[in-house]
Image (cartoon, rainbow, N blue to C red):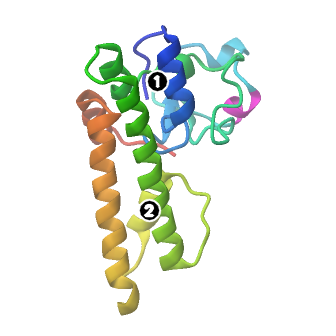
Amino acid sequence: MSVESTESPVAEQEICVKCGICCDGTLFNHAELEPGEMSSGSLPKKIEQNYRKMGEKERFVLPCQYFEGKCTIYDQNRAIVCSAFRCQLLKDFSKGRITKYDADKTVLNALKFRNEIFELYKRIFGVDTKLSFRQLLTEIGKMPVPPAEQSKELALLKAQCNIYETLLIKNFKSIKTFKSMIDTTVEQ
């Protein structure tokens, strides 16, 4: 996740508060910090605890420890990226390409679909996971070939994850962001 703007109109803030998929590990594995931000001493403790350096880039691991269904420090001091990042949905909304109603509906549908994926994961593996979507993808990728009775459901789970990732790219990630994800190895 990288910074593009520092302005957040009220309607965009309302959409963000309902969403949070840039914070909860659905879109990204990490959020980039501004140069020198870590050494400034102004970051909240849990963000500092999840700090990682990769080359010249400084970042913190997602999901954010301050996200509990919504940001618990939204109106407090936080990393610059937390208020500056604007997903594709917000960009489309700010340019009048979609209405607030459609943006809210897109967020609601994205959260609902993700929850369905987690329910299928739980049904297949019998675990109520606290993984983020990105972590779930990693876990699925590590899995050995399952028993025959799980193969069909696992194939369905993988297909749903692929469809969901496509919807995330279409509605929340810019093509530029998507290309950078492919070109960059991400440290977790």
Q: Tag 2's secondary structure?
A: helix
Q: Is residue 74 left or right of residue 54?
A: right
Q: CA distance from mark 2 to mark 1?
A: 35 Å
Residue that appears at 57% across and 78% down: 126
Q: Is residue 95 left or right of residue 66?
A: left
**Region rendered in magenta:** 45-49
Determine crowd level at label 2: few under 14, some 14-19, many 20+ residues with C-alpha closer than 10 A.
Answer: many
Residue 22 drawn above or below residue 98:
below
Q: From the image, which quarter does the N terminus lie in?
A: top left
Q: Residue 56 — which label?
A: 1
Query: Which one is in front, 164 or 5?
Result: 164
Looking at the rendering, which quadrant does residue 52 occupy? top right
Q: Is residue 34 visible?
A: no
Residue that appears at 69% across and 35% down: 66
Q: Residue 43 — which label?
A: none
Looking at the rendering, which quadrant does residue 175 occupy? top left
Q: Tag 1's secondary structure?
A: loop
Type of the residue with mark 1: Glu
Marks 2, 1: nearer the viewer: 2
Q: Is residue 109 visible?
A: yes
x, y percent for residue 129: 60, 64
Name the outermost residue toward the right: 45
Residue 79 drawn above or below residue 170:
above
Which residue is identified by label 2?
A: 117
x, y percent for residue 122: 54, 72
Query: Which one is in front, 137 or 15?
Result: 15
x, y percent for residue 184: 33, 38
Type of the residue with mark 2: Ile
Q: Is residue 79 left or right of residue 109?
A: right
